[in-house]
Image (tube, coloured by chain):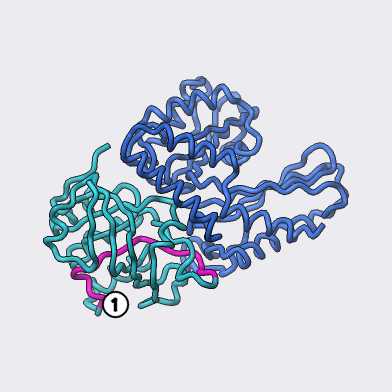
Chain colours: A cyan, B blue
Amino acid sequence: MRRVLELPYDDKDLLPIEPGDEVVLSGILYVGRDQVHKRLYDSIMGNEALPFDFNGNAIYYMGPSPAPDGFVLGAAGPTTSMRMDPFAPLLADHGLKVIVGKGPRKRPVVEAIGRNGGLYLQAYGGCGALYSSCIKTAEVIAYPELGPEALLKLTISDFPVFCMIDSRGHEYSR
Amino acid sequence: MDAEKAISDALIKAIRRLPDKASELIHEAAVNESHPSGRLVLEAIEKNIKISRETGLPLCQDTGMFWCLASIGRDSRVPLSRVEDAIINGAGKAAVDGFYRKSIVADPVYSRGNTGTNLPPVIVYESIPGSDIILHFLLKGFGSENCSGVRMLNPTAGEDGVIAAVVDIIREAGGKPCPPEFIGVGIGGTMDRAAVLSKKAFFHPSDKELADRILKKVNELGIGPGGLGGHYTALSVSVIEEPTHIAGLPVAVTVNCWAERMAEIVFKEGEI
């Protein structure tokens, strides 16, 4: 089934979305991958301030290619989610529970998404030009020294994804 | 001919335009895939190819690590330094002018500091008959490369053992390497030689019959496009074989995502 989700979200907006649904995202989407996850994890463990409010916000596992003139970003498709698995459960328990990435997740991530009533959404792998065309604004909000891995805040419109894990922790099955 | 420019032009094009054969195989899969989720993925991929063509944006943000097979004609009188400089400078120029993502870190274990140039490339040299110099590039994305691997089989494992080893690696990869995939299989030599052959196979396949048998078995896994299910886990398999030791049967697999980005540049004697 095809569904629409506005970001930031209310918890009740997540409930109707089920594994196997096509979901179209619009609104605000934060971006972070390997090094950002390590830093967010370390910040929580060290009781340090986080660079954005986790509650109601979603994160996209992505590192763009450079923007040519006239473009907000270069290619901007998802990266492999499993590398974020060591960090994702703790982040989900602190509110970062709606995730956009690609590929399978390990058991503790599935359980953390279910426990917190979040979502794991898969973006279509390798479709960097397609996702770039859905991104209207982009700004670096933390860790600029990480280059293509910096923490970004995007405004997106009609961004197509696929529900892999729903808010009850149920997984998509082929 | 300006060798650096010829290399750079080919690499700038390679991250934006798939080889015709790859586009055709993707289109054929999009038409024939019967699984509804797999079809959704193939529709997104075809839309992405179209947007990339219209905007000039790279197909994928992971523009890869430069991997180059430099085949040097054994009768060529060109100094090797000239060839190596052309590869490194041409690749470096493509990374800047072609808006490649800076994806290469200098220190793999500790600082992970970015080289900021997308260099160095991985270069494999070989000698070939004649005097031409032929460069084959792969733009190796690591979502797929992380799923590549080598298995050292028993010498008696035979064809069934080889097929089972490849299928096992692809099963383990699941949806991670952005299927539908292009699979290179290198058989024989030593462990490292089999690994090189698994990349050379994309350019010089030598055993189509075995490749077809592997493709059939891989596409019985049901992983499908994007790992969401369907027939098309792989679009193509390329196999190359070489002599090996009486005690072994090395089998290496290179997994390429659907965005099969590659380039071939040929220099005749005197052109470089």
Q: Which residue bears the numbered disc 1?
A: A51
Q: Could you tell whether B221 is left or right of B136 in the image? A: left
Q: Could you tell whether B183 is left or right of B205 in the image? A: left
- Name the residue rendered at 31%, 47% in the picture: A104
Q: Which residues are magenta?
A: A50-68
Quarter holding the C terminus of chain B?
bottom right
Q: Toward which corner of the image does residue B88 lie, by quadrant?
A: bottom right
Which residue is the extreme one toward the front? B54
Q: Could you tell whether B80 is left or right of A90 in the image? A: right
Q: Residue B132 in the image: state x and y as whole percent.
A: 81, 44
* A52 part of magenta stretch: yes
Q: Toward which corner of the image does residue A11 lie, by quadrant?
A: bottom left
Vertically, is A44 above or below B178? below
Q: Residue A31 in the image: state x and y as whole percent.
A: 35, 67
Q: Toward which corner of the image does residue B177 lie, by quadrant?
A: top left
Which residue is the extreme one toward the bottom? A49
Vertically, is A24 above or below A20? below
- Can see residue B192? no
- Can see residue B30? yes
Examine the residues drawn in magenta and state their main secondary structure. loop
Closer to the camera in the image, B170 or B35: B35
Vertically, is B235 above or below A50? above
Q: Could you tell whether A78 is left or right of A164 in the image? A: right
Density class for disc 1 (Cα within 10 Å; few <14, some 14-19, many ≥20) is: few
Quarter holding the N terminus of chain B?
bottom right
* A73 part of magenta stretch: no
Closer to the camera in the image, B41 or B63: B41
Which amino acid type is marked by label 1?
Pro
Q: Secondary structure at mark 1?
A: loop
- Name the residue rendered at 35%, 68% in the picture: A36
Q: Residue A10 in the image: state x and y as whole percent.
A: 15, 66
